[in-house]
Image (cartoon, grey):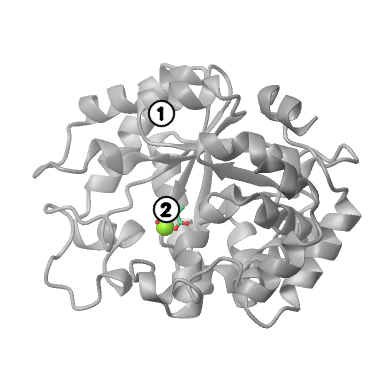
Amino acid sequence: RTAERLASFDGHGALSDGTPVPLLANVGTGDDARAAAEAGAQGVGLLRTEFCFLGRDAEPTVEEQTAAYAEVFAAFGDRKVVVRTLDAGADKPLPFLTDAEEPNPALGVRGYRTDWSTPGVLARHLEAIAAAREGSGAEVWVMAPMIATVSEAVHFQELAHEAGLPVCGVMVETPAAALTAEQILDRVDFVSLGTNDLTQYTMAADRMLGSLAELNSPWQPAVLRMVECVTRGAAASGTTSGTHKSVGVCGEAAADPALAVVLVGLGVDTLSMSPRSLAAVATVLASVDATEARRLAVLALEATSASEAKDAVRSQLPVLAELG
Ligand code: PEP
Ligand code: MG
């Protein structure tokens, strides 16, 4: 049965009680996007726009950028595509945007912050995203990486609106953004958790250092508490405004089927991952109902380490054995 379910995945993730969990894809290029659509993704939860910029010594023109994004939008028809604006710096240095001499690049001028040191690049980038959206039927959402304050989120939203992009959110990659998620969501339309960076910054453990892999795990109970802080913030903001705003996860955590169950149990609405993980995540989500997902989330929150959380949850999900 599991093999059949894996083969017949149609992109519509749901728990066994019918609670929908939209499953989206992380993509970079038009080729990626076509393969993701083919694999059944319901849309794109993270378009890594750096692909258009990496390996170049100058900013691509607005026209070049527009063509690259339009190719991705075209692969998804009228479905949702969440575009992350340029995330340069740290693990993704760019000669014309980031300072190679920074002593701590992961804590430096990266992601959204490059708009302070090199103004104009972000505005042109948003102009290209808006132009690509204009010529497509896709539902385009735009979000900024590496946000740490409510005021940055508001400023990004102003830039996006000026460019003609109506749906605007931010990534939650810093503990600062997680702790202020309610206030951020009072202003912007959605958030997406970048658990790779959120883990690195919560655990003070460099994501590039293999020797810190156990600390640098999204299974760390402290990271899961950060996630819960965000979903609670979203619920509180929704109670005040009467509208629940979407909390997604687009870091590697979403591609781990057992962790996906925990994330949904913590209140996450959508999951975005590498297309090859979609069917396995859908299969495991379909093996639990909302009450069970919540029970497993609490089990993970109460563990004393990442490996304890992971073992405790995995031992309660018999379907994992069938995945091989
Ligand atoms: C993340 O930080 O989880 C994320 C999705 O972005 P990246 O891995 O590109 O930093
Ligand atoms: Mg990141």
Quadrant in which residue 24 is drawn = top right
> Where is residue 252 shown, x and y percent of the image?
51, 53
Residue type, mark 1 in image = Asp
Looking at the rendered image, the quarter that the N terminus falls into is top right
User: Can the viewer see residue 128 in this picture?
Assistant: yes
In the displayed structure, would residue 86 be above or below residue 239?
above
Report which residue position mark 1 lands on.
Answer: 32
Mark 2 surroundings within 10 Å by alpha-carbon count, few (fewer than 14), some (14 through 19), many (20 or more): many
Horizontal side of 262 relative to 215 (left or right) equals right
Q: Disc 1 vs disc 2: which is toward the camera?
A: 1
CA distance for labels 1 and 2:
27 Å
Residue drawn at 17 percent across, 73 percent down: 102
Looking at the rendered image, the quarter that the C terminus falls into is top right
Quarter of the rendered structure image containing ligand 2:
bottom left
Residue drawn at 81 percent across, 60 percent down: 316
> Where is residue 49 shown, x and y percent of the image?
34, 40
Along the viewing direction, whichever of 180 and 264 lies nearer the viewer: 264
N-terminal of the pair, mark 1 or mark 2, is 1
Horizontal side of 224 relative to 58 (left or right) equals right
Mark 1 surroundings within 10 Å by alpha-carbon count, few (fewer than 14), some (14 through 19), many (20 or more): some
Q: Which numbered dot is residue 156? A: 2
In the displayed structure, would residue 296 be above or below residue 255?
below
Residue drawn at 83 percent across, 61 percent down: 294
Q: Is mark 2 within 8 Å of ligand 2?
A: no
Horizontal side of 99 relative to 215 (left or right) equals left
Quadrant in which residue 68 is drawn = top left
Residue type, mark 2 in image = Phe
Q: Secondary structure at mark 1?
A: helix
